[in-house]
Amino acid sequence: MNLPRVRAPEFPSHQPWLNCDRPLSLAQLKGRIVLLDFWTYCCINCLHILPDLKYLEQKYPEYLTVIGVHSAKFENEKETENIRQAILRYDIEHPVIVDQEFEIWQQYAVRAWPTLVLIDPLGYVVGMVSGEGKRGELDEAIAQLIAQQQAQGSASIPPIKPLLEKQKNPLITPLAFPGKVLADAASSRLFIADSGHHRIIVTTLNGTVQSIIGNGIPGLTDGSFSEAQFFGPQGMSWDANSQRLYVADTENHAIRQIDFTTEQVQTLAGTGEQNRTQGPQGGHGLETPLNSPWDLELIGGEVLLMAMAGSHQIWALDLMDGTVGTYSGIGAEAGMDGELDEAAFAQPSGITSDDEELFVADSEISSIRGIGLGNEPRVRTLCGSGDLFGFGDRDGTAEEALFQHCLGIDYAEGLLWVADTYNHKIKTVHPKTGECKTVLGDGTPGLLDGKNTTSRFFEPGGLSIASGILYIADTNNHRIRRVALDTLTVTTLELTGLCAPGFCVP
């Protein structure tokens, strides 16, 4: 952590700032400890350290200022408005400077996301660390700087109170950043992961609200529909035989079960703490920590496969004996095909199946992967570059096709339907040939109904098909979109009987 004393480079004066009403400078922060967080909002590792930053901010409010430096990986992440949406989605409360063209990144010689740079009250860089799990190290270093400051008799300057984006744009829409959606034709139900409001919404396929599961306050609490708490839930899987919905409770690092017969929520796997162990592992569900499960797929009614985005793996939960463990992936963030125990994934965020193969939206390598479910399972790449920086927007076959951080995927009628999230499009992929075609969205972020590529979406994150209708979780639009597959006509689903938590009028 300790570095030679080097004067911290000043922030460029021309870059946009978010979560504050005016640009900040290190000169005006002299007398306070400053912690710079170099991040990009696609990165699961960057999201994992947000609780650590909040912990440190709350522990040392009189001495510490945290500043996010957003240095984008993907082209879509360079847009200031998209960064603003990410700040709202993840409830970030510290100032953020938009590091256009990696100017600040280069000045501080940063090489990886996330990187944290500690600056002392005199404006010198005194520490730099990369990666997750650095809370204790940072806590100790900050405490030492405070002790030195107090011993010298120096007073800390008052904290700067930022004007938060959530104060300017409060999330009072009925849905807030819905991450995933699941349609079931047999029961005529639509399950919506209302991720920003930390709850699950159940409606008819026409949008009439039937149940609200979760009280809207982030937490990990089992119990009745009104008592239960979730934290940023994402993917879901439905078991019609048992009338149970399984939920990837992402920010709780847990798998939850919603029983519609008893109307109770129960935790099946995870401890509520993030698993930081790399490599294959497993154990009893309630004794084994998980790492940001993002999507689920029920196989044979007995095994729940999960896209474990945080550890770059696919995991399996045996619903019969309650054990959980790695199904495929060595834990390295990469795109490597082969046997289950030698393959590598990169933040898998969506899964679906045709009963013969599990298909994966592998977001950080912007590719579609396949995992055989038969006697000789292997991992293959259907389409996309398979490279961490091989992204774009191009139709074609196999490696010719390019996506940009694809998050959602569903199989129906012989095709894979893909939410090409950062391209604001919906595409189809043929599971045998790997041929990719754009079918919905013109690539411009927005909210526009229409046919084919005249429609517009804003970072769609999940999709599901039932009875000839494609339902899309249009995440940054806070909407569910409805597509008639016979005409590829997009409409916006009107939700009847739903409001934001705390904003319902009797």
Image (spheres, grey):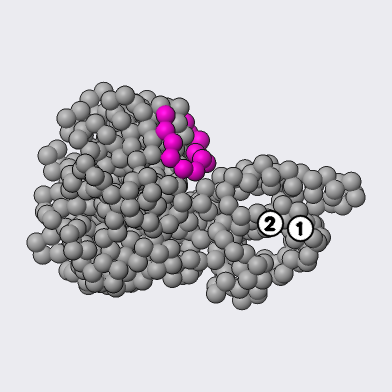
**Residue type at the position of mark 2:** Met
Q: Secondary structure at mark 1?
A: strand
The segment highlighted magenta reads 270-283
Look at 16% across and 30% down and name the residue there: 241
Q: Report the predominant secondary structure element of the magenta stretch.
A: loop
The amino acid type, in three-letter code, at marker 1 is Leu
| Quarter of the picture holding the C terminus | top left
Give neighbour class at mark 1: few <14, some 14-19, many 20+ (Cα, 10 Å): few
Farthest residue, direction bottom:
14
Mark drawn on residue 93: none
Image location of residue 95, percent across then percent down: 60, 59
Q: In percent of the image, x 45 and y 31: which residue is there?
A: 288
Please, is residue 153 above or below residue 456 in the view? above
Does residue 38 appear in the picture of this structure? yes
Q: Which residue is mark 1?
A: 3
Rendering coords of residue 294 (x, y %): 37, 46
Graded by Cα atoms within 10 Å as few (under 14), some (14 to 19) or many (20 or more), the crowding at tag 2 reads: some
In this rendering, would 10 be left or right of 397?
right
18 falls in the magenta region? no
Q: Can I make out residue 447 in this image?
A: no
Tag 2 and tag 1, C-beta contact below 8 Å = yes
- The residue that appears at 26% across and 46% down in the rendered structure is 377
Membership of 282 in magenta stretch: yes
Q: Nearer the viewer, residue 78 or 497?
A: 78
Residue beneath disc 2: 128
